[in-house]
Image (cartoon, rainbow, N blue to C red):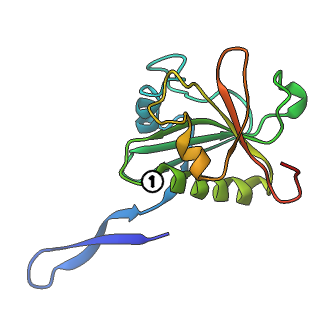
Amino acid sequence: MLFVEVWACFGGYGGRAEMMLPMFDGLVETTHFDHEMAELADRHYSRRTIGARQFLYSGRKLVLRNAEGTILFGWMYPDPTMRMDGQDGYNCAIFRNESKRLASEIIIEAEGFCFRKWGHGRCYTYIDPDKVRGRPPGNCFYHAGYKFVHETKGGKHLLAKPYIGEVS
C-alpha cells in the first residue's frame, strides 16, 4: 500500500514542516457509522433507508474505504446458523466504487483485509442484474475470481469465490 504524506512549510524563514494530510492509495478500515460512507451507501442500489446513519445490518462486519471517499466495501461475517439462504463465509454486503481504480483489484484488496481479520474462507455476494451496468452482471467479481453459483428466487445472482481446500 502506498503511503503519501503531504508536507507544508509555514512561517517563511525558520518555519516548520507539518504533516497536513495523510493519504493512502489503498483501502483503510472504518465503521458502519462513517458519515461520508453513509452518503456513498445512499447511492448504492441495495440501500434500504436513504439517509440513515448506519448502512450495514447487525453482526460481525468489516467496513473499508479509501481516503478520497470514493470507495465503500462492506463485509459481513454472519453466523451460518442464522442465515436463511444457507450460505457460509464472508458476504460482500455492499460495494460502491466511484474511483478510477479497477473494481476487481479493490475486491481482491478487500479480501486481504477480510482474511487478516477472520482467517481464510469462502467469499460471496449477491448481484441484482437489473441494477448494475456491467455485463455479465457482477463482471468485476468474475475478474476477481468469483464464479456464478445460482440465481435466487428474487432474480439475484449469487457469486462465490472458493478458498483453498474448498471444492468448487
Q: Is residue 74 left or right of residue 36?
A: right
Q: Picture coordinates of residue 128 (x, y %)? A: 57, 24
Q: State how many labels appear.
A: 1
Quadrant housing residue 17: bottom left
Quadrant housing residue 48: top right
At a point 44% along the width and 32% down the height, the residue shown is 133
Residue 79 drawn above or below residue 46:
below
| Residue 132 shows in this picture | yes
Q: Picture coordinates of residue 116 (x, y %)? A: 72, 60
Q: Is residue 19 left or right of residue 92?
A: left
**Which SS class for mark 1?**
loop
- As drawn, the residue found furthest toward the left would be 12
| Residue 28 shows in this picture | no
Residue 68 drawn above or below residue 48:
below
At a point 70% along the width and 28% down the height, the residue shown is 58
At a point 84% along the width and 34% down the height, the residue shown is 79
